Amino acid sequence: MTFLATKRLEWPARGTVALVLAALTVPGACLAGDVFGVPVAYPVGDAPWCVVITDLHGDLAPDLAVANNESDTIGVLRNLGDGTFGTQVAFDAADGPVGLAAGDLDGDGDVDLAVANWRSNNVSILRNNGYGAFPSQTTYSVGTGPWYLTLGDLDGDGDLDLAVTNYNSNNISVRLNNGDGTFAAQATYAVGASPYGIAAADLDGDGDVDLAVANFGSGTASVLLNNGDGTFAAQVSYATANGANSVAIADLDGDGDPDLAVANFLAGSVSVLLNNGDGTFAAAVSYAAGGYSFFVAIGDVNGDGDGDLAVVNYGAASVSVYRNHGDGVFAAQDLYATPQFPTCVALGDVDGDGDVDMAVTSAMSKNVSVYPNRTAGGPADLNCDGDVDFGDINPFVLRLSDPAAYAAAYPDCSDANGDINGDGVVSFGDINPFVQCIVSGGCP
C-alpha cells in the first residue's frame, strides 16, 4: 500500500491528538453502531403491514409501496429523486392486504405488484400502467389466511410465478404465470404449522428456484426443492425457534450458497441456518433480538460486501441490525427506535448515494419511516469498517503521526485515507474536517 507524501511529525503527536479528539464533546455524533440516521415518517393508510422498495415509475429512483391492512389499499410513494418521497397515492387491493412483492409480471418492462389478502383469502395482482399507477386489480384464490408471498421463475420459462403461505391451511399455494401476468390454477404443498413467511432462491445449486417457509406454529423452516418444472418435492424441516415468522435468503458466509435467516416472533430472536452447499442446512444459530421479532431483511448495510440482518421487533418498537463478520457470524445487535408495533423492514438505496437505506412500516403509526444510511466509508473511515464513528479516532491519529505503522495495521485500507479535505496530503489540516465527519456520521 502506497501513501501520499506527508510531512513528518516530530512531536509525540499520537497521544496528544488522541486526547484532544477523545475529549471533544460532539452533539449528535455518530456513535459506534449508528449506521442509520434519524428517520423521516411519511403518512400512508391504516395499519401499514409491509413495504417494498422498487422503481415503479421507471425513472431509476426506487419508490415505496406499502400494504395498508385496514384501508384495503396499496400505497405508492414516489421517490422525488433525492431519497425523499411524495404523498401516498392509494390503489385498491382486496380485504386485508398484508404481504407484498414486486416484479415485472406481464413482461412489459414495468414493475407490477402482488399482494396477499389475509381476510379475503386471495392474491391481488396490480399491473403497472407504465406510469407507476395501478388502476385495477385481478384476484386469484389461494388457501385460507394468506400472509406473505414471493415471486420467482419457478418453472424456468422466463416469467415470474408466485408462491404464497396459507396460515390457516398449513400449506403454500403456487400459481404459475401464463406468460402475460395471468396465473394458472394453484397447486398446494404441505409445510409446517401456521406458515407465515416465504422466500425463493436456488438453494441446492441446480439452477432451479426453490422455496423456504417460516412456520409460526411449529417453530421450523421448511425447504421445498424444485423438481425443475415448478413442482416441488416434499418439505424438509429445520428447527429454528419458537414462532418462526419471516424468512430471508442470501449468501451470509461468503461461500456462494444461499443461507437462511428466520425471525422468531415468540422467541424474540433471529436464527441463521447456513447452507451445506447442497440445499441442506446446518443447525440454526440464534441471536437475541427485541420483543416479538416479526420480520427479517438482508442487505449490506455497512458497505463491506457481506449480508447483514435487519429485524423488526413488534413488541419492542425497534429494529435490530446485526453486522456480519463476513463468515455468517454476526455482531451483537444495534437497536433503532421505531413507532409502535413495527411490522416490516425493507432495505435499498433510496437516495442514490451507493449505500443501503431502511424503510419500516409500523401498524399503529399510519406511516412508513425511512432511515437514511450514514455509512460513508471514504477517507474518514480510517479503520475501514464501513462506518465513520469514534472507532476511527485512534486510526486517524496513527495515520497522521506514523503512516508506515498505519499501513501495517490496516493493509486493506485506501492509500488516500486520512486526506479528509482532499488537498492531496494528510496533515493537521484534516483534523477539523475529520471531526465534522464524526459529527455527521459520514462525509459529503
Image (cartoon, grey):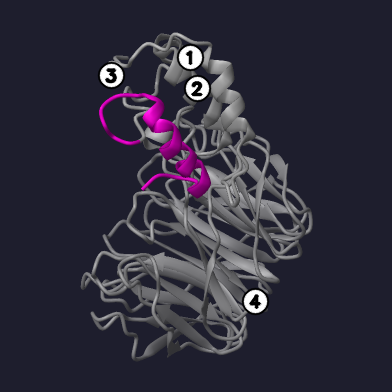
Residue in the image at 33% along x and 14% along y: 7
Mark 3 touches mark 1? (CB < 8 Å) = no
Residue that carries the numbered disc 2 in the rendered image: 397
Residue that carries the numbered disc 4 in the rendered image: 363
Sequence order check, earlier mark of 4 and 3: 3
Discs 4/3, front:
3
Residue in the image at 56% along x and 90% along y: 71
Sequence order check, earlier mark of 2 and 1: 2
Residue in the image at 42% along x and 83% along y: 87
Residue in the image at 40% along x and 59% along y: 230
Sequence order check, earlier mark of 2 and 4: 4
What is the span of residues highlighted in magenta in the rendered image?
Answer: 421-444
- Give the quadrant of residue 214: bottom right
Residue 409: image tag? 1
Q: Residues within 10 Å of mark 4 (few under 14, many from 20)?
A: many
For the residue marked with disc 1, what is the amino acid? Ala
Asked which secondary structure carries label 3, the reply is loop
Q: Label 4 vs label 3: CA separation?
A: 52 Å
Q: Is residue 59 left or right of residue 231?
A: left
Q: Label 2 vs label 1: CA separation?
A: 13 Å
Q: Label 3 vs label 1: CA separation?
A: 17 Å
Residue that carries the numbered disc 3 in the rendered image: 4
